Amino acid sequence: MFDKLKIAAFTISASLAFGLLSSAGAQESNSNSYAAVQGQAGGQDMFGAYDVAAGWPQDIGTLPGAEGWTFGAGQSVFAESPDRVFYLQRGLLPQIDPPSNRRVPEIGPSLSFPPTGIWRNATRVSIPGSGGTGGLAEAGITGWLEAGGRFGIDARWQYCILVFDRDGNVVEAWDQWDSMLQRPHYVAINPYDPEKHVWIIDDHKHIIHKFTNDGTTLVQSIGTYGELGADETHFNRPTFMAWFEDSSFIVADGYNGTRVVKFDADGNYLTSWGERGTPPNETRPYYWNNVHGVAIDPATQRVFVNDRGNRRIQVFDPDGEYLYEWSVGARPANIHMFIITDDGYLWAADRSTHKILKYDLDGNFLYSWGTYGDFPGGFAGVHGMSVDQEGNLYLAQVDNKGGVQKFVPREGANPDYIIGRPHYAAWE
């Protein structure tokens, strides 16, 4: 009897001790958690350190003449402030509900439509049809028509430049400029410009436009409208641009060009560097394929260039002297673009892995998040990224329906997982 009592007491003590150890282990695990929000029970970081802003943006079918239409391919987004978010898109697509899933034996056995994921790829059906490296801008519209596109039925060229408020309402529509645009690719404001001019790159017209902040006046155009080239007055499908602290700037040129071009603050040509490489495994400095993304570190003024075709980032000093590089990974890695935030990190968008990636400026990989899909918060072809003064994140997507999404930082989120603020020097 005494032995049984000793065994029972030992069992109870051991159970209590194990419970205390388990509790302590759980607390230690929480303190060392890699979750975006420490100590959360259940769930997963599907959208990283963010919540999806439901219903943002609002339906644009209420705009004059847009009844029955919705967003086209989302090319770029730039947040001047939480209440003034610029967005570029390639016209409108018809507002239709996804079809019910059905077998399509006339195409092939065991096939069904729509496939899992994205049932309508916005970039393939938006105007124009020609896109990546080697795509002739001059064939963009004719190619879309030859593929079966019908103006006014399959797509509509209207409302290419929109401005949203914090609730996703359209507060400005710059449709007075639609007729001169063919493929608006990038929108931004020079952070060193107190007048906040708005810059828009049209890669199919080989030109960069500078507008007054209210959009009423075209102040300047750089490049030769509708003519490709590789000299002081021509581009060959430019893609992105970034500014130095004296308001001189660089242009990534581009889809078919193989240069980075530097201009002074007035838009006068200064210099260029870069040569055509041999994709997909070019390793020589200064050689690249598809110069699709460029950013400047505000602290060092170093230039970071996305050599997209060779899956690497090359880094230069302000005058184009090569410094170092890093790889963004083997296939399917496919970095679309990146930004450098004021806290000294580079955040990139990968079109193939559907991830947002964080690197330090030496190229060390730190974090990633994102998931594929056409549900709220899902990604498909992130092509533009911007952060406002409140930390809200905006992503433009060329493949996904809706075109652009807003993400709000989660309460209690680890700040290391939040994309930092952009550099503001002349305005907030």
Image: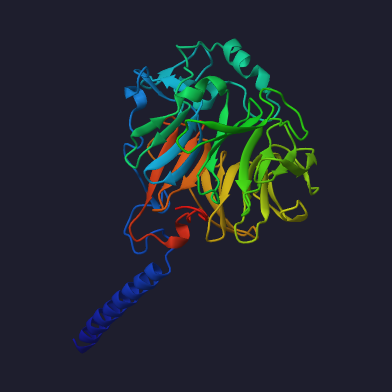
Relative to 177, is 292 on the left or the right?
right
Q: Which of 177 and 413 is in front in this view?
A: 177
Q: Classify the position of the N terminus by image quarter.
A: bottom left
Where does residue 365 sit, x and y in percent of width and height?
A: 59, 57
Decide: is 362 above or below 209: below
What's the residue at 33%, 60% (across, down)? 40
> Does residue 110 appear in this view?
yes
Q: Nearer the viewer, residue 291 or 249?
A: 249
Relative to 191, is 36 on the left or the right?
left
Where does residue 270 sit, x and y in percent of width and height?
A: 75, 44
Number of numbered tags placed on the structure image: 0
Quarter where residue 333 is shown: top right
Decide: is 80 above or below 201: below
Q: Nearer the viewer, residue 139 or 41?
A: 139
What's the residue at 72%, 56% (across, down)? 317
Decide: is 102 above or below 378: above
> Does residue 119 appear in this view?
no
Where does residue 28 sit, x and y in percent of width and height?
A: 39, 73
Quarter where residue 204 is shown: top right
